[in-house]
Image: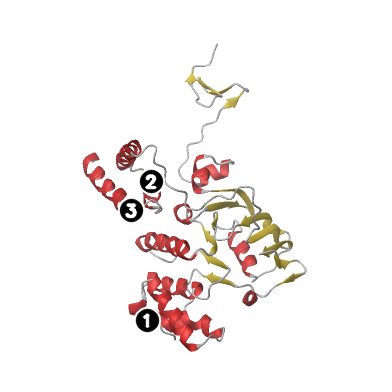
Amino acid sequence: MFIPATRELSSAIFLVGPNTRVISVMLFDLSEEGNFEVLSALGMILFGRHARHRGHRLPRHRPRLHGAFVRAKLALRGIEKRYGDVAAVSGIDLELKEGEFVSLLGPSGCGKTTTLRMIAGFISPSAGTIEMNGQMLSSPSGVLPPEKRQMSMIFQSYAVWPNMTVAQNVAFGLELRKLPREEVRRRTAEMLEVVHMGHLAARYPAELSGGQQQRVALARAIVIKPQVLLLDEPLSNLDANLREEMRFEIRRLHDEFRITTVYVTHDQAEAMVTSDRIAVMNQGRIEQVADPHTLYNKPRTRFVAGFIGRTNFIHGVNDGTHVAFGRSACRLRRWTACHPPAR
């Protein structure tokens, strides 16, 4: 098992660039599937590469700003949504920076889609405010209509026009904005090439696969150059292979256009692959917001620990210096050491 796994995975590592997320996805999926033989092989390969390249650090994907005030692109402050006595969303505080990709992750009924619809302007908040570039978009006293928010939304059901060709679907938003005909034609052709759909420009949605229809929806949303892109579980109608392909396609398009993005999903692997940060939601509240690595390795609550990946919970008693687990105990140090408790 080890030799073929090593050959396959080493080929994958050397074929991908430093900014792709293929390896992180592979690690997460292998762990979820319990495929520890291949996982151990990948670990040894990565260790060997690290040893050979020690001291040569890759540049950061984006430079960090020191001491500079960066205004939030999109800010949710104390957002609540109530339906009678039921609180669908309770006290959401979240800020997104320019060009950031943030996922709202959680189980069904946790309030993530309600939050997204409030950002889009489809429903008004019961309390709190939503701002973009410092401009008020939503509050209990008033809501800016969706068509004036400079946002695009991609739905779970694709929502492409069945009576229009691929090219006509992508051009629809540009034509509504009454742009010159030549500019509409040029931008539509350029966007179709970006999503690898140029050769299918004359086809109708009924002649496309689910993945191709979702590419059309992505192209139509991005071509108008929105300030914020909203995606509501866009891959849930696709089969497993197409979902994996489209994960990388969504991230590739984000890296190319750097549009601030809010992505709703209940799929942990999807969020881990695509996101700069993930907001884990439960019962209308945000449990934790962090980058995927921190979220997986340092969950702040029991819910986050159980929801992100497979987790074994061990009950212990903390006396301030040790944590006792039945007949064993661990000293509370940076590097813990387990031993039988003193009698």
Rendering quarter of residue 44: top left
Residue 89 percent across, percent down from the top left: 66, 58
Nearer the observer, 277 or 343: 277
The image shows residue 257, relative to residue 54, as above or below, that is: below
In the drawing, what numbered circle is on residue 201?
A: 1
Q: Residue furthest top?
A: 343
At label 2, the amino acid type is Leu
> What coloring was used for the rendering?
secondary structure
Residue 95 percent across, percent down from the top left: 63, 56
Residue annotated with mark 2? 27
Q: Nearer the viewer, mark 2 or mark 1?
A: 1
The image shows residue 315, relative to residue 133, as above or below, that is: above
Q: How many other residues sit within 10 Å of disc 2, few (<14), some (14-19) or many (≥20)?
A: some
Residue 47 percent across, percent down from the top left: 34, 37
The mark that comes first in sequence, 3 or 1, is: 3
Residue annotated with mark 3? 16
Q: Kindly report the distance in space between the C-alpha atoms of the residues bearing marks 2 and 1.
A: 37 Å
Q: Kindly report the distance in space between the C-alpha atoms of the residues bearing marks 3 and 1.
A: 30 Å
Q: How many other residues sit within 10 Å of disc 3, few (<14), some (14-19) or many (≥20)?
A: few
On screen, residue 77 versus residue 305, left or right, reads: right
At label 3, the amino acid type is Val
The reply to whether residue 272 is in sight is: yes
Nearer the observer, 9 or 325: 9
On screen, residue 69 versus residue 234, left or right, reads: right
At label 1, the amino acid type is Ala
Q: Residue at x 38, y 59 (%)?
A: 244
The image shows residue 302, relative to residue 160, as above or below, that is: above
